């Protein structure tokens, strides 16, 4: 996309070393291997980069049947009708000329409309192949024009997706939008434009980043508009990926630390501790020579690993609620990370079951919440979170790293 958009903006990023003609990337027809192709090939260069099928020929084959254009027309009508129901959109037009400023030429988007009176949006339907070159040129045009290009598909299945659809998908923060008869019905019910959104969501399992496909109805006001990069998305996949990559990067150390801690009751392994201590120090976190040297460290980690595992780790107690009572009695400063861990690992139901007397839920939870909201109250100071190990806890338990620094009130 960068190469093609550079060519469209007459500032190409790469050129052929033999003839200096700008190049863009294309894929082989039958496998996903990429090579550079001359933007124009007129025989001046000994390197031949164009195949037998010209774009014109491919397009001619593509528009072979009338069926395609009927489907295309129906898509435009669905989008236009949905837009006219939406009070946030005005000036809805089908196939109207969008005249460029200066000598930028013009475009004829499938449907155009103005979002909240200020942002002109071009809705382009993609039913089959649209060349990356065309996609890039349109992005460049609408970027210059102060507008926004919005691609709409009639279906999008990640397992069976064409390369040209991926060009749109990956350049749009892994979000794709779909309009069909079903979304038209949903738009009528909602009184605004409703589309189906397909997006990819990352997760980390055993230190490996996995992507899964999600899908759901969205309205335009649910979306984030990033006009500078001509992106519109519901789920921010880039940010989620960064978060996951931070987790996978340090996963081996986190795994080794957990293994060490969980097997500690079977025998303390000092060389292992020293090794972990050294590796963690590389992250700017210092651990004591012996785990017991730091006041409260052992009980804190036992408590948090217990919450993560769902059963007592290190403690002689028989379940989580007994640990909770102990933390309340002896380590009030650890209640905040403990509570976050229970929430992050969905232990609410388990605690409720273990809390047969209701003593935890009705008395202790109430007490620490009150102390957190009124920290000047008598005795409330004891409940102020102990921040001595926040760096270590954030590292070992990234699932609570975002919220741990917050004030619990
Ligand atoms: Zn060349």
Image (spheres, helix red, strand yellow):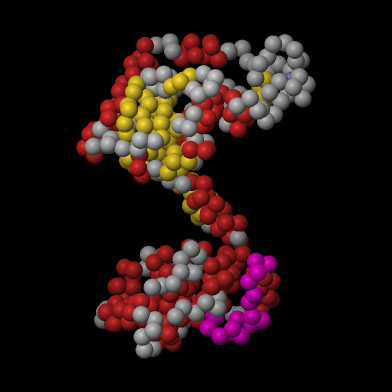
Residue farthest bottom in this picture: 378
What secondary structure characterizes most of the magenta part? loop
Whole-percent x, y for residue 158 in the image:
45, 36
**Image-based side of 283 in relation to 219, left or right:** right
> Is 116 or 336 nearer to us in this picture?
116
Please state the total of marks drawn on the protein image. Answer: 0
Residue in the image at 43% along x and 85% along y: 382
Where 82 falls versus 402 (above or below)? Answer: above
Range of the magenta residues?
Answer: 282-298
Is 259 colored magenta in this rendering? no
Is 292 colored magenta in this rendering? yes
Judged from the image, the quadrant occupied by ligand 1 is top right
> Residue 396 occupies which quadrant of the picture?
bottom right
Where 384 falls versus 47 (above or below)? Answer: below
Residue in the image at 43% along x and 10% along y: 64
Whole-percent x, y for residue 401 in the image:
50, 65
Q: Does residue 131 appear in this view?
A: no
> Residue 368 occupies which quadrant of the picture?
bottom left
> Is 237 or 142 nearer to us in this picture?
142
Q: Does residue 296 appear in this view?
A: yes
Residue in the image at 63% along x and 77% along y: 287
Please identify the quadrant where the C terminus is shown: bottom left
Whole-percent x, y for residue 259 in the image:
57, 69
Whole-percent x, y for residue 156 in the image:
41, 32
Residue in the image at 44% along x and 41% along y: 225
Where 333 falls versus 122 (above or below)? Answer: below
Residue farthest front in this picture: 102
Please identify the quadrant where the N terminus is shown: top right
**Image-based side of 48 in relation to 68, left or right:** right
């Amino acid at each position: 996309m960068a190469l093609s958009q550079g060519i469209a903006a007459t500032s190409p990023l790469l050129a052929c070393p033999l003839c200096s003609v700008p190049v863009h990337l294309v894929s082989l027809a039958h496998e996903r291997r990429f090579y550079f192709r001359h933007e124009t090939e007129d025989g001046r260069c000994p390197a031949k980069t164009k195949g037998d099928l010209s774009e014109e020929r491919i397009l001619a084959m593509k528009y072979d049947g009338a069926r395609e254009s009927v489907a295309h027309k129906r898509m435009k009508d669905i989008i236009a009708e949905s837009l006219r129901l939406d009070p946030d959109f005005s000036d809805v037009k089908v196939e109207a000329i969008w005249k460029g400023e200066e000598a930028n030429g013009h475009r004829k988007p499938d449907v155009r409309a103005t979002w909240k009176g200020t942002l002109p949006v071009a809705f382009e339907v993609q039913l089959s192949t649209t060349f990356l070159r065309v996609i890039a040129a349109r992005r460049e045009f609408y970027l210059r024009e102060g507008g926004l290009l919005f691609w709409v598909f009639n279906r999008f299945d990640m397992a069976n997706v064409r390369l040209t659809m991926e060009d749109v998908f990956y350049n749009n923060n892994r979000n794709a939008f779909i309009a069909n008869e079903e979304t038209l019905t949903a738009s009528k019910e909602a009184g605004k434009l409703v589309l189906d959104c397909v997006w990819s969501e990352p997760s980390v399992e055993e230190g490996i980043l996995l992507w899964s496909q999600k899908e759901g109805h969205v309205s335009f006001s649910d979306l984030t508009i990033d006009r500078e990069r001509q992106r519109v998305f519901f789920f921010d996949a880039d940010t989620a990926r960064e978060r996951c990559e931070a987790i996978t990067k340090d996963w081996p150390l986190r795994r080794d630390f957990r293994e060490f801690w969980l097997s500690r009751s079977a025998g303390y392994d000092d060389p292992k501790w020293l090794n972990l201590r050294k590796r963690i120090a590389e992250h700017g976190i210092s651990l004591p020579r012996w785990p017991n040297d730091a006041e409260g460290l052992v009980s804190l980690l036992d408590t948090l690993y217990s919450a993560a595992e769902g059963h007592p780790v290190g403690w002689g107690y028989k379940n989580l609620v007994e640990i909770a009572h102990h933390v309340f009695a002896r380590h009030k400063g650890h209640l905040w990370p403990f509570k976050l861990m229970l929430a992050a690992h969905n232990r609410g139901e388990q605690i409720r079951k273990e809390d047969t007397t209701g003593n935890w839920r009705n008395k202790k939870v109430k007490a620490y919440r009150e102390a957190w909201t009124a920290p000047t109250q008598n005795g409330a100071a004891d409940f102020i979170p102990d921040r001595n190990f926040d760096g270590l806890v954030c590292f070992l338990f990234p699932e609570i790293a975002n919220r741990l620094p917050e004030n619990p009130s």
